Each structure stands twice: as structure tokens, then as C-alpha cells.
Image: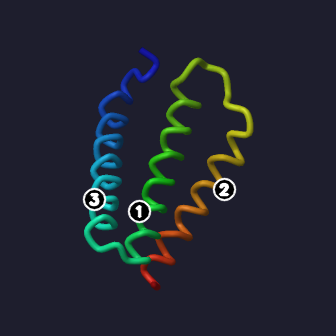
């Protein structure tokens, strides 16, 4: 198991991220507002980026191509979407 002692924290983070993604999606489906759509996009992008980090860190051992671009661009884009959702 490549997770080792990080298994618990990684599973906990995955659980929290899944709940957050579900809540954001539910809010968008219930409200349909631009704010909810931006928040959902930001949260789902964070979810994708965290998955990319997990695959890169705990996957086959080979670094993902363009991982830096995927991770950095993804995080900044997700943050921007969440901020824009608060301002909308």
C-alpha cells in the first residue's frame, strides 16, 4: 500500500471533498443561480485537482505529464471560481 500512514488522512480528505462536491452540486441544482454554478465549478475543479495530486503522489510512481500546470492552474482557477461565486 503506497499510502502507508497517510491512508486515514487521505480517506478523510476524500470523504470531505466528496461531501463538498455533492453539496455544491445540490445547491446548483436547487437554486440554478450563477453564484451556485460558479461555486459548483470551483469545488468540482478542486476535487479534480486533489485527485490529480493523489494519482501523482500515490499512483504508479511515475510523475504525470504536465502535472505542475494541471495542479497550479487548476487550484488558481478553482479559487477564482469560488471568489466569483461569492461576488455574484
Which residue is outermost to the top?
A: 1
| Disc 3 from disc 1: Cα separation | 8 Å
Place of residue 10 in the rendered image (x, y in percent of width and height, measured from the top left): 37, 35
Please state, as top left, top right, bottom left or bottom right, where the C terminus lies in the image. Answer: bottom left
| Disc 2 from disc 3: Cα separation | 24 Å
Q: Earlier in the sequence, mark 2 or mark 1?
A: 1
For this view, does 71 lie left or right of residue 8? right
Q: With respect to residue 31, does 13 lie above or below?
A: above
In-front residue for pair 29/82? 29
For this view, does 15 lie left or right of residue 72? left
Q: Residue at x 42, y 80 (%)?
A: 86
Which residue is outermost to the bottom?
A: 87
Q: Residues within 10 Å of mark 1 (few under 14, many from 20)?
A: many
Q: With respect to residue 83, does 9 lie above or below?
A: above
Place of residue 8 in the rendered image (x, y in percent of width and height, measured from the top left): 30, 31
Q: Which residue is mark 1?
A: 40
For this view, does 52 lie left or right of residue 3? right
**Picture quadrant of residue 32:** bottom left
Q: Earlier in the sequence, mark 2 or mark 3?
A: 3
Q: Which residue is mark 3?
A: 23
For this view, does 62 lie left or right of residue 57? right
Q: Residues within 10 Å of mark 2 (few under 14, many from 20)?
A: few
Q: Residues within 10 Å of mark 3 (few under 14, many from 20)?
A: some
Which numbered dot is residue 73?
A: 2
Please state, as top left, top right, bottom left or bottom right, where the N terminus lies in the image. Answer: top left
Q: With respect to residue 84, does 20 lie above or below?
A: above
Amino acid at each position: 500500500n503506497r499510502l502507508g500512514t497517510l491512508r486515514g488522512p487521505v480517506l478523510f480528505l476524500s470523504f470531505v471533498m466528496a461531501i463538498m462536491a455533492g453539496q455544491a452540486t445540490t445547491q446548483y441544482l436547487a437554486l440554478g443561480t450563477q453564484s451556485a454554478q460558479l461555486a459548483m465549478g470551483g469545488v468540482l475543479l478542486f476535487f479534480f485537482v486533489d485527485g490529480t495530486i493523489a494519482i501523482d503522489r500515490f499512483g504508479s510512481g511515475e510523475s504525470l505529464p504536465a502535472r505542475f500546470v494541471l495542479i497550479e492552474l487548476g487550484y488558481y482557477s478553482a479559487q477564482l471560481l469560488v471568489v466569483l461565486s461569492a461576488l455574484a
